[in-house]
Image (cartoon, rainbow, N blue to C red):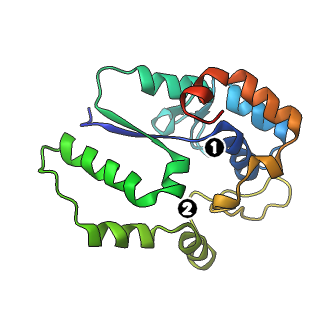
Amino acid sequence: YTLGAINIVRDPRNVITSLMNHYSINEEEGLKMLDSTHRNLRDANDENNFATYSFISSWANNYNSWKMSKNIKKILIRYEDLEKDKENTFIRIVKFVNLIMGKKDYIDKNKLRKSIETTNFDLLKKKEQSEGFNEATYSVKDGKKISFFNLGSENNYKKLLKSKTINLIEEIYKEEMRELGYI
């Protein structure tokens, strides 16, 4: 059991571009992965070890399952808010964690700002380049390591996806995307 959950949701049009980079796949394969109700994560080196298995399902099913769950204290965070309004978004997270842990509602602003500074995308990207990052994968095409911290705020589906793919995503996930303010 757990005290609570922080559910981070991201615009599916930008999720697909990240999937394309991370798994070295094209738009069609990315869309199929995004919409797969059987999608899961598990250690590819140990297909029979279900201890590494995490069921994800489709983007909509994953979002809706967290939204509808009633037996867990949770907070929904839009990934885009982490980018655009870091301080207020992290304040929401800290307040939530304090609440579920039964602590008084106190936020050390200096620690908060330091946390934001040290988890800056550009800093993490540089750190990955110099030290590596365990979750980075290898390209199927050339066997080279793919940068996990790839584009950050430059991950703009409008520049990276075909109109057809964007329209399909918006049609498939219309209800959820409206609810989240993405369309």
Classify mark 2: residues with Cα within 10 Å, few (<14), some (14-19) or many (20+). few
The numbered dot on residue 102 is none
Q: What's the residue at 77%, 65% (across, down)?
A: 144
Depicted 59 relative to depicted 119: above or below = above
**Residues at marks 1 and 2, CA–CA distance in whole angstroms:** 14 Å
Depicted 122 relative to depicted 47: above or below = below
Q: Where is residue 173 in the image (x, y as percent from the top left)?
A: 67, 24
| Res 112 seen here | yes
Mark 1 or mark 2: whose residue is earlier in sequence = 1
* Camera-nearest label, 1 or 2: 2
Q: What's the residue at 69%, 49% (across, down)?
A: 18
* Residue 124 horizontal side relative to residue 114, left or right: right
Query: Quick one: which residue is furthest to the bottom in this view?
Result: 130
* Residue 148 horizontal side relative to residue 115, left or right: right
Identity, as a three-letter code, of the amino acid under mark 1? Ala
The numbered dot on residue 44 is 1
Q: Position of residue 126 (x, y in %)?
A: 60, 76
* On-image quarter of the N terminus: top left
* Residue 154 horizontal side relative to residue 86, left or right: right
| Res 37 seen here | no
* On-image quarter of the C terminus: top right
Q: What's the residue at 69%, 32% (across, down)?
A: 34
Specify the quadrant of the image occupied by residue 180.
top right
Identity, as a three-letter code, of the amino acid under mark 2? Asn
Q: Nearer the viewer, residue 146 or 51?
A: 146
Q: Where is residue 121 in the image (x, y as percent from the top left)?
A: 56, 66
- Give the labeled residue for mark 2: 134
Q: Where is residue 109 in the image (x, y as percent from the top left)?
A: 27, 67
Specify the quadrant of the image occupied by residue 167.
top right
Q: What's the residue at 32%, 54% (across, down)?
A: 91
